[in-house]
Structure formats: structure tokens, C-alpha cells
């Protein structure tokens, strides 16, 4: 009896493991470019435009023989690197500021939440006054928020100055509405 049980396990174990392997999701990454626009408030009104390189993590079903159609599925996670340049209007000094930032972002789209997800960014920014280009302000900005379709996002962030003499027209708290329009290569 013991030999029959060993033969049963030896013959049918590969069948069960193959079945378990075929039900695991297959993840792939689509690489796309996206246009980004940010508008918000940081003690001064700002508008930023830029580009982003994104890596979309999507779950793809296994292809069977004769399956020529590539299924369309929404991404469940997006990693991105972005570069933005923007204009900031300092209401207290009645002047324009220029800024540029470079950073990374992550979107997480839980399957149970439908088309809403969570997002986080970390950016480094440099600002200057148009009237005095010698005075610069460098900041690190972590931001968290929610996203819809990974296209529309609302962030709250904190802008931490690195230099000892920050520009007074740029506050530490930052509210951003972001729009990201992907376009394929």
C-alpha cells in the first residue's frame, strides 16, 4: 500500500503543480511617455508642464495556442520618472517665480477599489525669481494623494527647503491637481 501511495504522489504531483502554476498571474511592463500638467497652491499659485516616462505594471492572462488577440487590461501599478518646468506667481511680492523639478512617482491601483488608487511622489525642485535670477531656492517635496484612472490626481505635499535663505513666496505646504495624458511610442 505504501508503494502505491508513493507512485500516486509521484505521478499526480506534477499535474497539481502545473495547475497551480497556470493560475498565477503574469505581470508585464508597458513603457510609455506621458504629458503632465500640474496646477496648485503653495503660498503662491503655480502651473507646471512637463513629460514623464512611465512603466505600467499590467497583469496579462496566459496566452493559449491560437490566441492572436492581445487582451486589454488596466494597470495595477505605475512607476514613473518626471521632469516639469513651471511658473509661480508670488502674490505677496507681486512677481513671477520660475521653477523646475525632477522626481519619481508611484501609482497603486487596488483591484477592489475600481478606478481609484493611491499615489506618491518625491521631487527635487529649484526656484528662482525672474527679477533676481541669482537668488535660488532648492527644495525636496514628498507628496501623497489619490488618483482616478491614473490620469487625474490630487496631492498634498510638504516642501522642505535645503538652503538657509528660502524664497518667501513659496510655502511649505503644497496642494496639487495633476493631469497626466499618456501617449504611446
Image: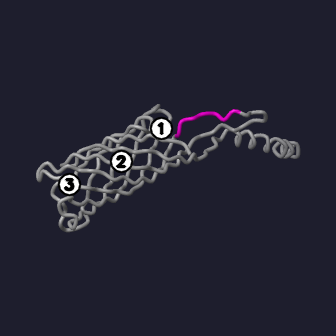
- Count of numbered marks: 3
Q: Secondary structure at mark 1?
A: loop
Instruction: Point out residue 56 in the picture as x, y percentages from the top left corner.
Output: 53, 45
Task: Look at mark 2 in the image and give the residue it sits on.
Answer: 49
In front of the other: 43 or 117 = 43
Task: Look at mark 3 in the image and give the residue it sits on.
Answer: 170
Q: Secondary structure at mark 2?
A: strand
Residue 71: within the magenta? yes
Instruction: Tell me what residue is drawn at x 87 percent, y 45 percent.
Output: 7
> Which sits earlier in the primary sequence, circle 2 or circle 1?
2
Query: Left of 19 or right of it: where is 183?
Result: left
Query: Left of 9 or right of it: where is 32?
Result: left
In front of the other: 73 or 165 = 165
Residue 153: within the magenta? no
> Which sits earlier in the primary sequence, circle 3 or circle 1?
1
Q: Nearer the viewer, mark 3 or mark 1?
A: 3
Amino acid at each position: 500500500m505504501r508503494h502505491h501511495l508513493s507512485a500516486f504522489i509521484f505521478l499526480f504531483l506534477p499535474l497539481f503543480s502545473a495547475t497551480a502554476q497556470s493560475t498565477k498571474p503574469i505581470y508585464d511592463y508597458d513603457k510609455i511617455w506621458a504629458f503632465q500638467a500640474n496646477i496648485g497652491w503653495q503660498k503662491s499659485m503655480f502651473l507646471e508642464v512637463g513629460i514623464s516616462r512611465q512603466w505600467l505594471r499590467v497583469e496579462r492572462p496566459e496566452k493559449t495556442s491560437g490566441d492572436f488577440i492581445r487582451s486589454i487590461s488596466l494597470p495595477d501599478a505605475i512607476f514613473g520618472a518626471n521632469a516639469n518646468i513651471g511658473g509661480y506667481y508670488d502674490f505677496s511680492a507681486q512677481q513671477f517665480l520660475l521653477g523646475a523639478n525632477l522626481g519619481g512617482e508611484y501609482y497603486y491601483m487596488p483591484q477592489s477599489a475600481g478606478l481609484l488608487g493611491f499615489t506618491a511622489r518625491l521631487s527635487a525642485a529649484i526656484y528662482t525669481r525672474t527679477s533676481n535670477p541669482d537668488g535660488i531656492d532648492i527644495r525636496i517635496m514628498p507628496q501623497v494623494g489619490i488618483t482616478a484612472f491614473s490620469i487625474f490626481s490630487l496631492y498634498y505635499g510638504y516642501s522642505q527647503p535645503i538652503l538657509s535663505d528660502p524664497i518667501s513666496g513659496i510655502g511649505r505646504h503644497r496642494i496639487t491637481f495633476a493631469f497626466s495624458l499618456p501617449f504611446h511610442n
